[in-house]
Structures are given as C-alpha cells and as structure tokens.
C-alpha cells in the first residue's frame, strides 16, 4: 500500500491507522461536496471504517451517490462508512454527558466517534448545574464509567463538578452555546481550563471528534 494516495486536491494518509490506531478522518468544512465524495470513494477502497466530520446534508448526498453504503448522522453532522466489526468490552464504558440539550450535537460527535473505534458508549443529556439534582441522580453511571466526556457551553461549570465527583479521567468539551459574553465558547473553554478539579483535560471548542478520539485511546489502555 502506498504511504498516501494523491488526489490532486488531497493526499490521503494510508498509514494513519498504523501510527495512531485510527484511520484519517475527513474534516469537511471548507471542502466542496465533490471533494468530500471523492475522498470517501477513494478511502472506501480500503478495509477501514471511514469518518467524515462537519458534513452537510448536501455533502452526504454527493457521498451517497458514489458510496451507497454511507450513512449520515444529521445531528452530529457525521458521515460514516462501516467496514469493520468490533466487539466492545462491556466492562469499560465511555460516558458522554451534556450540560444542556443544546450541547447534544457536539456530544453525539464524540459518542459516535468513540463507538466507531469499537467502544461501548453511554449517554446522559441535560444534567447541567442549573439543576444539580439531575446530575447527582447519575452518580451510579458516573462511578461505573471508565472515561467521562463532559460537554457544556455557557460557563462550562459541569466539567468541574463532575471532576470533583469521580476518580476517572474527565475530558471536557466547551461548546459555542451561550449568550454574548460567552464569546462563542471562549468563556466555557477558560472555565474548564481553570478547573480546580484535578484530572480534567480540555479539548477545543465544539471538538466532539477530538474528545471521542481521546476517550477511545484512554479506554483502550490497560
């Protein structure tokens, strides 16, 4: 196999799985629908799962025309082609949590990414600190999870609260949800970076894919 495939407008990294344990993901924003479709079509010649992030429905239509087995997760804006079968370890669960319903799109990007890596994922939505009893009712799920992804906008406080309740890695994902002074997620990002709860790591604003990948890597470690 070539180290990479040359498409003129893109160079597909064929050795990403060997180096990183997961094939190259396609970041669709800024690409044309035809470019995305041709990249997926070329990658479909291999045997690995294919994941395209930040994909529009128009991009999916173009992909579907060339790769009929592709599926679209509209809320998460993900295009997926499933080529590998994994048996997840039921004793090692990734828990994905959101502060609000508005954060679910980013959370689903994280959850589906981790599932595509072969992990068991549980979801708990809308347990933000404005109603802390909703979070406290989930303590059994938090205690049984191996890794927790916390997705929150506004001030991002949920990550600190969860980090103070558990003894496992917490991956915080700030979202761009919030009013003006949230500055498109910067307030949540800074709040999470300044968490006084040890063991909380932070990915970029709205980066559900990055959180899902990191959660999967951690969950695979023995």
Image (spheres, grey):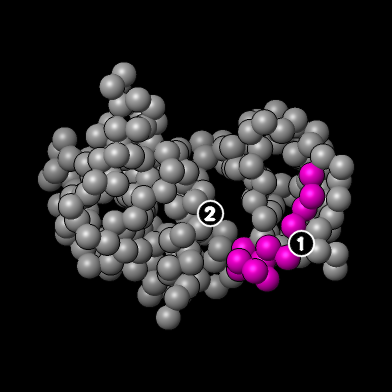
Q: Position of residue 192 (x, y in %)?
A: 28, 45
Does the image show residue 120? Answer: yes
Q: Quadrant of residue 28?
A: top right
Q: Give the alpha-carbon distance from disc 1 to disc 2, as whole Å.
A: 19 Å
Q: Is residue 65 above or below residue 146?
A: above
Q: Is residue 209 left or right of residue 90?
A: right
The crowding category of the residue bearing disc 2, from other C-alpha atoms within 10 Å (few below 14, some 14 to 19, many at least 20), is: many
Q: Position of residue 5 (x, y in %)?
A: 84, 55
Residue at image coords 22%, 49%: 195
Q: Which mark is residue 151?
A: none
Label 2: which residue?
A: 113
Residue at image coords 38%, 66%: 93
Which comes sooner in the sequence, label 1 or label 2? Answer: 1
52 or 21: which is nearer to us? 21
Which segment did they paint magenta? Answer: 10-22
Name the element at disc 1: loop
Q: Which mark is residue 14?
A: 1
């Amino acid at each position: 196999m070539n180290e990479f495939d040359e498409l003129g407008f893109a160079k597909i990294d064929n050795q990403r799985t060997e180096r990183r344990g997961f094939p190259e993901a396609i970041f669709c924003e800024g690409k044309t629908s035809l470019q995305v479709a041709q990249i997926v079509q070329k990658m479909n010649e291999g045997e690995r799962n294919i994941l395209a992030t930040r994909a529009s429905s128009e991009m999916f239509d173009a992909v579907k025309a060339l790769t009929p087995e592709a599926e679209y997760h509209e809320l998460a804006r993900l295009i997926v082609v499933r080529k590998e079968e994994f048996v997840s370890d039921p004793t090692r669960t990734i828990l994905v949590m959101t502060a609000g319903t508005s954060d679910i799109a980013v959370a689903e990007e994280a959850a589906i990414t981790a599932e595509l890596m072969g992990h068991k994922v549980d979801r708990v939505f809308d347990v933000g600190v404005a109603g802390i009893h909703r979070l406290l009712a989930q303590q059994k799920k938090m205690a049984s999870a191996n890794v927790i992804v916390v997705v929150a906008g506004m001030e991002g406080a949920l990550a600190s609260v969860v980090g103070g309740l558990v003894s496992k890695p917490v991956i915080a994902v700030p979202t761009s949800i919030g009013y003006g002074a949230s500055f498109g997620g910067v307030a949540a990002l800074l709040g999470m970076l300044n968490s006084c709860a040890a063991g909380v790591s932070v990915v970029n604003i709205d980066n559900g894919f990055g959180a899902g990948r990191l959660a999967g890597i951690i969950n695979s470690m023995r």
